[in-house]
Amino acid sequence: MRVEGTHHRSIWLDEETGALRIIDQTKLPHRFEVRTLADFESVVEAIRTMRVRGAPLIGVTAAHGLALGLSADPGDRALTRMANELVATRPTAVNLHWAVVRLVESVWSLPPEERAAAARARAVALCDEDVACCEAIGTHGLTLLRELAREKSGEPLQILTHCNAGWLATVDWGTALAPIYKAHREGLPVHVWVDETRPRNQGASLTAFELREEGIPHTVIVDNAGGHLMQRGLVDAVLVGSDRTTSTGDVCNKIGTYLKALAADANGVPFFVALPTSTIDWTIDDGLEQIPIEERDAAEVREIVGRTAEGRLERVALFSAASPVANPAFDVTPARYVTRLVTEEGCFEASRPGLAALRATKEADRDGD
Ligand code: MRU
């Protein structure tokens, strides 16, 4: 997607030097800074501190991290240690585990001297696959938006989104924002209510930035405003992403998503979840019991970073350090509140049979390739 009119991906290899580059998302929206990740350690740091974040992007960044690590030490023991370390950085987003497993599988049987190059090629392929996958999510989600738009007689479709599930959370296109980009490009009028998404403010800082750069009408709201807007008939659909979805359709996503689902249910607003199938954890069937919820640092709640009038980025305290803080980063929305799952394979019911149908479609597509 675009930044100041120029197309960007969120992660890429520099054409001249081959260096791994990312956009430092901790600086957005105030500064667009590109950062080089030169070794395994800098990749781990970037994921842990959320310079890169969003389930699909974390996965492919980890894959590149392993490639970098293997160029320093291609041995079995190093590979196992690095894979474990990466998986532990963000415990909820399952794409991380998915990508690390794929990467390890693709190099394990190779002689050590061939591993780094093979891993790098695989990481590049995973990035390209993510782009194609998110674009397909956009195409399938667009059919749902077109249906809803029919009842709007040309008025903008009002979509509420939470957190950032746009191109910055993936390699390009995004998950929840991909159908919105497609709708806007084909001239379907849309307006997006952007939840600010405390404590890290991915909505206000990243989603609003993305939509602004693409020229899509949007309004930032505090997280508590969604229910009120839905009661007033000002939301036609909620569209969010996912960090892990179970084989029964329970959806784990950024903290606060569950409350939006409850409000949507109470007000008859469709609640759509967009996700690549790499976000599905087929091994579990109960999101509440089985998904580990990442507990993040108290400083994310106590402090906030903003830009001063002079243009400096400054961190300030919001309340006393003497008050204890709880900071669960994700919550689980039970499948019964999810109207549809939008994936690269099409739109499916969030239920055990719905997920089984999705799996069968995916397998049939793979066999057909
Ligand atoms: O903690 P983050 O910023 O990595 O979490 C990302 C989310 O929860 C997003 O909402 C998203 O839907 C998942 S990634 C497309």
Image: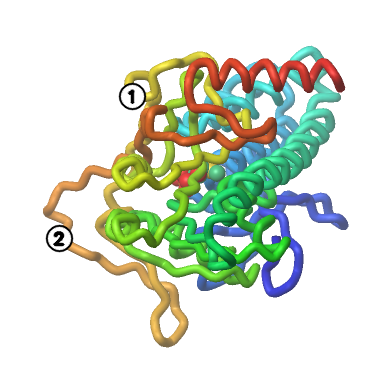
Secondary element at tag 1: helix
Name the mark on residue 320: 2
Is residue 365 depicted above or below 229 in this figure? above
Is residue 153 depicted above or below 174 in this figure? below
What amino acid is at disc 2? Ser
Q: Is residue 268 left or right of residue 3?
A: left
Q: Residue furthest left?
A: 322
Secondary element at tag 2: loop
Find residue 42 and report its horizontal and vertical position in percent. 59, 46
Q: Is residue 325 left or right of residue 363?
A: left
> Where's the C terminus, which quadrant?
top right
* Residue for badge 1: 288
Mark closest to the chain's N terminus, 1 or 2: 1
Name the mark on residue 52: none
Viewer-nearest residue: 17 or 244:
244
Q: Label 2 near label 1: C-beta < 8 Å?
A: no
- For ligand 1, tell me if the residue under mark 2 lies within 8 Å: no
At 39% from the left and 81% from the top, the residue drawn is: 308
At 67% from the left and 54% from the top, the residue drawn is: 10
Q: CA distance from mark 1 to mark 2?
A: 32 Å
